[in-house]
Image (cartoon, rainbow, N blue to C red):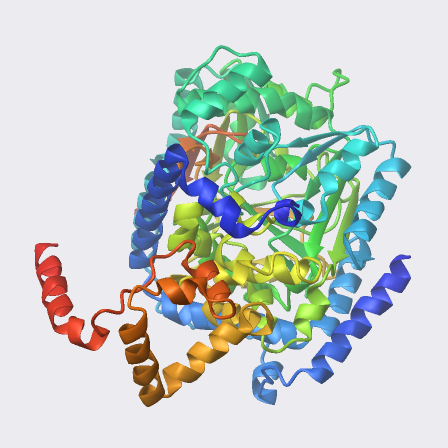
């Protein structure tokens, strides 16, 4: 991905200059907050269920190998085929193999982050297949030849005007800025494609070891169409998504739509178990489930980081993150942006790549406070920062000073006397470099007067501001 | 390749379990899987249940009709067909619809029932060409205002999905109060081999999206409209 060519700082600095993007993201964050706040106000047992959901994921992962083999057996019993893929290229090869064997020419897709992660679209396109994303947002970014910028709202960075231009240009339809009409345009453009497609590809929100079912959650009906009309259904799923039984799945369903979109349940929650049975007139004749590792077993083996595998991909942490709201999803440069992405992207990427993402966090904790499965994302980000050798010396020095108030005061007062604006220090050969880098996007503190002396006045000003609001 | 991958992944995970001093669970917690996460709650009286359920449905922009008996329900169905100028429909082969005589009502209203056996088109294409899809919800969820429909012989998935209007008859449906009750319901649907139906859909309102500027639009790839015809005999209505 783009991570190779630039870093978060460069990309986010560029994004911050885009006025339209800023307005669009700000509005989206407000709308999302209003919707989800309302849903949680109505759901009085939210804390009980968050704790339950955390327990479900903790228990499922604590017996992951066993659950995966049970899942495999149940899928087989239901007439499905299970494939295992160590990495992206193996997973893509499996899909291409199924496609080739069945003479597949056209593929419709339900939105799936894991197929973005493995780059499946490109692999299929390279063999000459037609591949169409069918989720409205994902269809928009596919037409625009862009990656999604949010894991549940892929085109959240686009305005209706931009979509109007895009549809007029690519679909050869009269330009309209009406969101309802734009939606109907996509319906009309894709309906025939669904009916003619040979293969449907989806992800999976969960798989249930007890029954061999996959659970698919959506609002548009495009995922249902993807698993109803084509003759073959392939689901690609990260190995961490298996839960033990139907009760566990139902606990997660009680939270997933509420945090993702503020709905009690999404329009369609589908529990799919194998292919169509004898005597049924629709649904696929073949069902394939691909279990993908792609770095997950390595994360699994690190106790300090395992919690990121609890993630439901609801997208809520992106939508409540103040950093995401300012910089947008593309700034993160990977498939998974925002708080969960800042943990997952560097862990899934080759070593050293995307390792600046854990620093793209203010530590405000909004994500941890609202995560439906209680993942402590800031803690995971700190664990990743600690693993990063870059900037370690500076942080260690500061940490030591912060832990020794006497030394801190002495160092601060020395600097105050010698170099209050930190101008000389900034130019200094050894100390200066990290300071210059740090100050690039921040204003350095003025050391003229110690903070402890400035605080009484600041406190009064803050009080006045608070009274006003 | 796949068998190698299987062994590699499983052995990595087993190693990971051993290596990690990760959150070990009490034996108790591990041993109590499928007892259900939903505590028993006082039963909601029929009348309150259906009243609240209708409110939830309406808040989801579903159109709700409520009939006191089958005769009234038939009249309502005929009126809906006329008002919506329905010309063609796909309909489930389901006992509730049979008791209602729904197919007869459709034919009497001049509605062509698909699939047309003489056509070469598959079921999905024909369902896509129909003005209306008629199903019967096998269960409902109060908390979310949801209809639960399961696939099977004569119970096609497309019927509730491809036509622009989905009409679901609710009579004799299982009542679930909360989302977690879904687990128990699904278990009662396992066949003699322990398999769930090939597809179970929990339908909560018409299809919708908010992918452009987070503005909600009803009707995307699925039905633009959801109509629920409830037959509530006795004082339940």
Residue B36 seen in the current view: no
Residue A201 seen in the current view: yes
Above or below, B181 against A14 in this view is below
Please state the total of marks drawn on the protein image: 0
Quarter assignment of residue A249: bottom right
Quarter assignment of residue A78: bottom right
Quarter assignment of residue B135: top right
Q: Position of residue B211 (x, y in %)?
A: 47, 35
Work out whether residue A99 or residue B131 is closer to the camera in this orientation and state it. A99
Q: Which residue sits at x=56%, y=40%?
A: A148
Work out whether residue B37 or residue A180 is closer to the camera in this orientation and state it. A180
Q: Position of residue A235 (x, y in %)?
A: 71, 48
Work out whether residue A213 or residue A444 is closer to the camera in this orientation and state it. A444
In the image, taking residue A250 as reference, residue B229 lies left or right, namely left
Q: Position of residue B38 (x, y in %)?
A: 46, 69
- Quadrant of the rendering where the C terminus of chain B is positioned: top left
In the image, taking residue A80 as reference, residue B226 lies left or right, namely left
In the image, taking residue B123 as reference, residue B12 lies left or right, namely right
Q: Position of residue B19 (x, y in %)?
A: 71, 83
- Quadrant of the rendering where the N terminus of chain B is positioned: bottom right
Above or below, A336 against B12 in this view is above
């Amino acid at each position: 991905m783009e991570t190779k060519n630039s870093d978060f700082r460069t990309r986010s600095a560029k994004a911050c200059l885009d006025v339209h993007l800023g307005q669009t993201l700000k509005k989206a964050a407000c709308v999302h907050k209003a919707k989800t706040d309302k849903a949680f106000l109505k759901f009085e047992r939210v804390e009980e269920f968050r704790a339950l959901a955390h327990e479900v994921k903790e228990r499922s992962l604590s017996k992951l190998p066993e659950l995966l083999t049970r899942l495999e057996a149940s899928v087989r019993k239901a007439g499905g085929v299970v494939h295992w893929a160590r990495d992206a290229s193996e997973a893509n090869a499996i899909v291409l193999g199924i496609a080739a064997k069945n003479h597949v020419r056209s593929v419709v897709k339900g939105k799936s982050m894991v197929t973005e992660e493995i780059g499946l679209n490109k692999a299929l396109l390279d063999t000459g297949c037609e591949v169409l994303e069918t989720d409205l947002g994902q269809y928009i970014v596919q037409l625009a030849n862009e990656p999604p910028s949010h894991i549940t709202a892929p085109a959240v960075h686009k305005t209706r005007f931009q979509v109007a231009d895009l549809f007029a240009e690519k679909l050869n339809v009269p330009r309209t800025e009406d969101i309802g009409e734009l939606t109907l345009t996509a319906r009309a453009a894709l309906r025939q494609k669904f009916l003619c497609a040979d293969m449907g590809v989806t992800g999976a929100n969960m798989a249930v070891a007890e029954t061999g079912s996959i659970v698919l959650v959506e609002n548009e009906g495009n995922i249902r169409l993807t698993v109803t009309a084509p003759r073959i259904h392939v689901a690609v799923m990260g190995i961490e998504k298996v839960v033990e039984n139907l009760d566990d799945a139902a606990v997660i369903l009680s939270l997933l739509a509420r945090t993702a979109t503020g709905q009690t349940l999404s329009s369609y929650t589908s529990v799919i178990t194998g292919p169509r049975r004898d005597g049924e007139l629709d649904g696929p004749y073949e069902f394939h489930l691909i279990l993908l590792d792609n770095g997950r077993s390595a994360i699994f083996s690190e106790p300090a980081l395992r919690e990121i595998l609890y993630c439901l991909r609801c997208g809520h942490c992106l939508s409540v993150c103040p950093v995401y709201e300012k910089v947008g999803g593309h700034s993160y440069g990977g498939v998974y942006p925002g708080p969960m992405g800042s943990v997952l992207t560097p862990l899934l990427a080759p070593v050293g790549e995307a390792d600046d993402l854990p620093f793209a966090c203010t530590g405000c904790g909004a994500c941890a406070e609202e995560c439906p499965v209680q993942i402590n994302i800031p803690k995971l980000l700190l664990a990743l920062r600690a693993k990063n050798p870059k900037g370690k010396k500076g942080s260690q020095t500061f940490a030591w000073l912060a832990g020794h108030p006497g030394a801190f005061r002495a160092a601060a007062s020395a600097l105050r006397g010698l170099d209050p604006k930190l101008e000389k220090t900034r130019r200094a050969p050894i100390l200066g470099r990290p300071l210059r880098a740090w100050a690039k996007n921040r204003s350095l503190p003025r050391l003229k007067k110690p903070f402890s002396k400035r605080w009484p006045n600041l406190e009064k000003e803050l009080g006045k501001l608070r009274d006003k609001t | 390749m796949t068998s190698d991958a299987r062994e590699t992944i499983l052995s990595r995970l087993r190693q990971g379990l051993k290596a990690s001093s990760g959150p070990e669970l009490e034996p108790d917690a591990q041993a109590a899987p499928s007892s259900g996460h939903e505590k028993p709650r006082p039963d909601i009286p029929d009348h309150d249940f259906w009243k609240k359920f209708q409110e939830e449905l309406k808040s989801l922009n579903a159109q709700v009709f409520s009939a006191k008996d089958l005769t009234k329900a038939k009249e309502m169905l005929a009126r809906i067909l006329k008002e919506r100028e329905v010309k063609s429909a796909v309909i489930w082969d389901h006992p509730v619809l049979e008791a209602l005589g729904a197919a007869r009502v459709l034919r009497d209203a001049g509605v062509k029932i698909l699939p047309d056996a003489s056509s070469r088109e598959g079921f999905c294409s024909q369902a896509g060409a129909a003005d209306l899809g008629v199903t019967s919800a096998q269960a409902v969820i109060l908390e979310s205002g949801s209809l639960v429909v399961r696939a099977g012989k004569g119970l096609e998935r497309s019927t509730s999905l491809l036509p622009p209007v989905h009409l679901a008859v609710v009579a004799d449906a299982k009542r679930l109060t909360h989302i977690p009750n879904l687990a128990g319901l699904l278990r009662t649907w396992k066949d003699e081999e322990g398999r769930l139906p090939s597809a179970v859909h929990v339908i909560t309102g018409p299809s919708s999206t908010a992918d452009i500027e987070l503005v909600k639009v009803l009707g995307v790839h699925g039905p633009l409209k959801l109509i629920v015809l409830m037959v509530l005999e006795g004082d339940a209505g």
